[in-house]
């Protein structure tokens, strides 16, 4: 995927692109800047060789000239050939360096000086000249092509590569120093989002990262303190209400005669007690209960037997399920809420099922009813605390905490709560998804 997602990879990639671009620009500038001096130096050298050969031939005895020419060829790779009008001369390429070289050498040797890199299908640096400057050029002086070649400055290129590697190493170190604290902060933020308290972040690094870590730690402490205060207030209030309710129940039993009024008041008191119990469940949380391997088969069978015993039968549909890491009391409380909601707001038959999904990665515990269901647009809203649906499913009285408790239990386990239509789009299927392995739980949190 391009561009890469991680900050480390992005900074390293951008730094590498910048270094490569700057080195390429540096090499281009160096080559352009070196063109004129190199062409001038080559022209001066070639002119000096021509003048040296001319003077040597003029001053040497005629009988010694062949020996002199042989010495030039053997020692310096300089050859002389007579110039013929029938010579096949290949024109010079249209290159900035070559044209500059031609200009300089013609300024030194004369405007009629002919130049070529190939004459009569033979490669070399061919320069025309005359032994007598007042006569037409009647000889070719031939130099090796190596003298006209422009060599790559490997030493400078090596230093450039070394500098590029150093820049990339520093860029990688800087990116790592930035990305690692951000990665730890992202992990801590996920823990906060799942209702957990992460360990304080190290307030180190650059000034901006220190401020960010300090602000995050302060936020985490504030959220934890607010959560504790809210839990204590809610638990204390719910606990204090149970005492007068117990007295009211006793007074109703002792004071009122048997009849509709007594039965109704007793039912109201029981409903208020159930509401207070749900408040206590929500306020209590599950942080103190450890996660251990438990048998979900026994848990589902126990729930089915319990609800059958209290005249709220539940059909159990489950295959042999593997041991699952979970908080057993919290999961039982969550399934209790789902079954209670199914009987309150749905319609029988109620089905309790368990299955393993995604190639053994997830355990799904589902409660399905045959009621009217809920709209797809309301599924996420109903998971929030103190939220109820304003249709037929909410005719019974409730606190709006049932699904919020289940959602919190799911998040504590690294799982999720899914609300979908039942079979044939009838009723509601509430599915509690729990990871079967520690790796899947860690990836969710």
Image (spheres, rainbow, N blue to C red):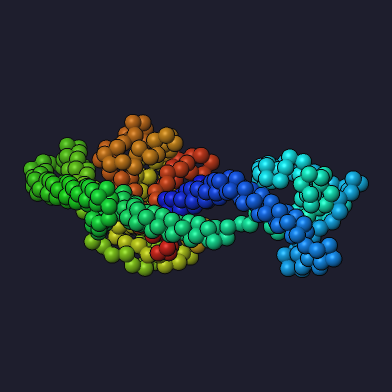
Q: Residue at x 50, y 57 (%)?
A: 160
Q: In this rendering, would 12 be left or right of 219?
A: right
- Give residue 255's quadrant in the image: top left
Q: In this rendering, would 390 be left or right of 100?
A: left
Q: Position of residue 409 (x, y in %)?
A: 32, 53
Q: Nearer the viewer, residue 153 or 386?
A: 153
Q: Residue at x 27, y 55 (%)?
A: 205
Q: In this rendering, would 233 be left or right of 119?
A: left
Task: Identify the image quadrant of the C terminus.
Answer: bottom left
Q: Position of residue 76 (x, y in %)?
A: 72, 65
The mark tally for this picture is 0
Q: Nearer the viewer, residue 111 or 440?
A: 111
Q: Nearer the viewer, residue 206 or 190?
A: 206
In the image, residue 346 above or below residue 175: above
Q: In this rendering, would 373 be left or right of 202?
A: right
- Residue extending farthest to the right is 86
Q: Is residue 285 visible?
A: no
Q: Residue at x 63, y 57 (%)?
A: 151
Q: Position of residue 359 (x, y in %)?
A: 53, 60
Q: Is residue 160 visible?
A: yes
Q: Residue at x 53, y 58 (%)?
A: 156
């Amino acid at each position: 995927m391009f561009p890469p997602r991680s900050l480390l990879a992005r900074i390293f990639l951008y730094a590498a692109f910048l270094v490569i671009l700057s080195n390429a620009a540096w090499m281009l500038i160096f080559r352009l800047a070196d063109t004129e001096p190199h062409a001038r130096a080559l022209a001066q050298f070639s002119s000096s060789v021509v003048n040296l050969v001319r003077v040597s031939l003029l001053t040497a005895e005629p009988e010694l000239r062949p020996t002199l020419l042989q010495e030039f060829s053997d020692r310096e790779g300089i050859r002389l050939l007579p110039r013929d009008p029938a010579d096949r001369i290949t024109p010079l390429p249209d290159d900035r360096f070559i044209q500059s070289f031609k200009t300089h050498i013609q300024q030194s040797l004369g405007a009629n000086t002919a130049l070529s890199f190939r004459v009569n299908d033979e490669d070399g640096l061919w320069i025309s000249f005359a032994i007598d400057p007042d006569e037409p050029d009647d000889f070719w002086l031939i130099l090796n092509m190596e003298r006209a070649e422009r060599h790559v400055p490997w030493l400078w290129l090596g230093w450039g590569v070394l500098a590029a590697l150093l820049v990339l190493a520093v860029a990688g170190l800087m990116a790592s120093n930035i990305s690692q604290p951000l990665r730890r902060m992202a992990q801590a933020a996920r823990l906060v989002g799942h209702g957990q308290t992460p360990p304080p972040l190290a307030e180190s690094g650059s000034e901006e990262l220190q401020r960010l870590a300090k602000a995050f730690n302060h936020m985490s402490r504030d959220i934890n303190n607010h959560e504790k205060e809210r839990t204590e207030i809610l638990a204390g209030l719910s606990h204090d209400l149970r005492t007068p309710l117990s007295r009211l129940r006793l007074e109703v039993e002792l004071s009122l005669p048997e009849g509709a009024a007594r039965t109704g008041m007793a039912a109201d008191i029981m409903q208020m007690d159930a509401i207070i119990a749900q408040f206590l469940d929500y306020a209590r949380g599950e942080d103190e209960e450890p996660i251990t391997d438990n048998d979900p088969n026994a848990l589902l069978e126990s729930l089915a037997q319990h609800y059958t015993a209290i005249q709220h039968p539940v059909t159990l549909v489950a295959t042999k399920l593997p041991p699952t890491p979970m908080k057993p009391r919290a999961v039982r409380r969550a399934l209790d809420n789902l079954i209670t909601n199914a009987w309150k707001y749905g319609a029988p038959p109620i089905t309790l099922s368990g299955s393993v999904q995604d190639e053994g990665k997830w355990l799904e515990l589902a409660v399905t009813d045959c009621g009217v269901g809920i709209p797809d647009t309301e599924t996420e809203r109903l998971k929030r605390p103190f939220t109820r649906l304003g249709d037929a499913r909410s005719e019974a009285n409730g606190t709006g905490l049932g699904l919020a408790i289940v959602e919190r239990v799911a998040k504590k386990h690294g799982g999720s709560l899914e609300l979908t239509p039942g079979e044939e789009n009838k009723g509601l299927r509430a599915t509690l998804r729990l990871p079967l392995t520690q790796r899947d739980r860690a990836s969710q949190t």
